[in-house]
Image (spheres, rainbow, N blue to C red):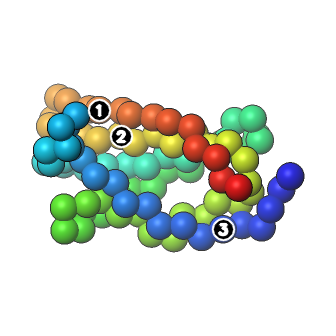
Amino acid sequence: TRGDARDFDAEIFVGDLEHVPKLAQTVTLTLSAPTLGIEPMKREAIADNGLWRVEGLIIPTTGTWLVEVDVRLSRFELARPAAEISIP
Protein backbone atom coordinates (compact mmCIF):
# COMPACT_ATOMS: atom_id res chain seq x y z
CA THR A 1 0.00 0.00 0.00
CA ARG A 2 1.09 3.51 -0.65
CA GLY A 3 2.01 5.61 2.38
CA ASP A 4 2.84 9.25 2.89
CA ALA A 5 6.12 10.68 1.61
CA ARG A 6 8.89 10.40 4.18
CA ASP A 7 11.99 12.50 4.72
CA PHE A 8 15.19 10.53 5.41
CA ASP A 9 18.89 11.24 5.89
CA ALA A 10 21.51 8.72 4.77
CA GLU A 11 24.98 8.17 6.23
CA ILE A 12 27.43 6.17 4.14
CA PHE A 13 30.66 4.71 5.49
CA VAL A 14 33.29 3.92 2.86
CA GLY A 15 35.60 1.12 3.97
CA ASP A 16 36.97 -2.28 3.11
CA LEU A 17 35.65 -5.65 4.30
CA GLU A 18 37.49 -5.24 7.62
CA HIS A 19 35.80 -1.84 8.14
CA VAL A 20 39.03 0.06 7.57
CA PRO A 21 38.10 3.49 6.18
CA LYS A 22 38.95 4.18 2.54
CA LEU A 23 39.31 7.58 0.96
CA ALA A 24 36.74 8.35 -1.70
CA GLN A 25 36.70 11.20 -4.18
CA THR A 26 32.91 11.24 -4.60
CA VAL A 27 29.92 9.24 -3.41
CA THR A 28 26.54 9.17 -5.16
CA LEU A 29 23.39 7.54 -3.76
CA THR A 30 20.69 6.26 -6.14
CA LEU A 31 17.26 5.10 -4.99
CA SER A 32 14.67 3.45 -7.22
CA ALA A 33 11.61 1.24 -6.90
CA PRO A 34 11.19 -0.46 -10.30
CA THR A 35 8.30 -2.67 -9.12
CA LEU A 36 6.45 0.48 -8.06
CA GLY A 37 7.24 2.29 -11.31
CA ILE A 38 9.59 4.80 -9.63
CA GLU A 39 12.60 5.78 -11.72
CA PRO A 40 16.06 6.26 -10.16
CA MET A 41 16.64 9.34 -8.00
CA LYS A 42 20.33 10.33 -7.74
CA ARG A 43 21.84 12.46 -4.98
CA GLU A 44 25.45 13.46 -4.41
CA ALA A 45 26.70 12.78 -0.88
CA ILE A 46 28.71 15.33 1.10
CA ALA A 47 31.82 14.29 3.06
CA ASP A 48 31.24 14.84 6.79
CA ASN A 49 33.71 13.76 9.48
CA GLY A 50 34.57 10.31 8.10
CA LEU A 51 31.12 9.62 6.64
CA TRP A 52 29.27 10.67 3.52
CA ARG A 53 25.84 12.23 4.08
CA VAL A 54 22.76 12.77 1.99
CA GLU A 55 20.13 14.84 3.77
CA GLY A 56 16.48 15.33 2.99
CA LEU A 57 15.84 12.23 0.89
CA ILE A 58 12.17 12.04 0.03
CA ILE A 59 10.85 8.48 -0.14
CA PRO A 60 7.42 8.93 -1.72
CA THR A 61 5.95 5.53 -0.81
CA THR A 62 6.47 2.36 1.17
CA GLY A 63 7.72 -0.84 -0.42
CA THR A 64 10.92 -2.43 -1.68
CA TRP A 65 13.57 0.02 -2.84
CA LEU A 66 16.86 -0.56 -4.66
CA VAL A 67 19.75 1.36 -3.09
CA GLU A 68 22.87 1.80 -5.22
CA VAL A 69 26.00 3.65 -4.12
CA ASP A 70 28.64 4.79 -6.61
CA VAL A 71 31.95 5.30 -4.80
CA ARG A 72 34.67 6.95 -6.87
CA LEU A 73 37.89 5.76 -5.22
CA SER A 74 40.24 7.12 -7.85
CA ARG A 75 40.19 8.39 -11.39
CA PHE A 76 40.08 4.79 -12.63
CA GLU A 77 38.34 2.91 -9.79
CA LEU A 78 34.59 2.93 -9.12
CA ALA A 79 32.86 0.65 -6.59
CA ARG A 80 29.10 0.06 -6.98
CA PRO A 81 27.55 -1.78 -4.04
CA ALA A 82 23.77 -2.25 -4.18
CA ALA A 83 21.05 -3.75 -2.00
CA GLU A 84 17.30 -3.87 -1.66
CA ILE A 85 15.69 -2.35 1.42
CA SER A 86 12.13 -2.40 2.67
CA ILE A 87 10.47 0.87 3.67
CA PRO A 88 7.51 0.00 5.95
Which amino acid type is marked by label 2? Answer: Asp
Q: At 51% from the left edge and 42% from the top edge, which residue is drawn?
A: 67
Q: Image quadrant of residue 20?
A: top left
Residue ranking furthest to the top: 76
**Circle nearer the viewer, 2 or 3:** 3
Which sits in the foreground, 56 or 49? 49
Q: Which residue occupies 83% across, 56% down? A: 2
Mark 2 and mark 3 lie on one chain; the one further toward the N terminus is: 3
The residue depicted at 71 percent of the width and 55 percent of the height is: 88
Q: Amino acid at mark 1?
A: Ala
Q: Which mark is residue 62?
A: none
Residue 6's label in the rendered image is 3
In 3D space, how far apart are the residues under numbered discs 2 and 1 (Cα atoms)? Answer: 6 Å
- What residue would you read off at disc 2? 70
| Residue 6 vertical position relative to residue 88 in the rendered view, above or below | below
The residue lying at 38 percent from left, 34 percent from top is 81
Q: What is the secondary structure assignment of the residue under circle 3?
A: strand
Marks 1 and 2: in contact by CB < 8 Å?
A: yes
Q: Amino acid at mark 3?
A: Arg
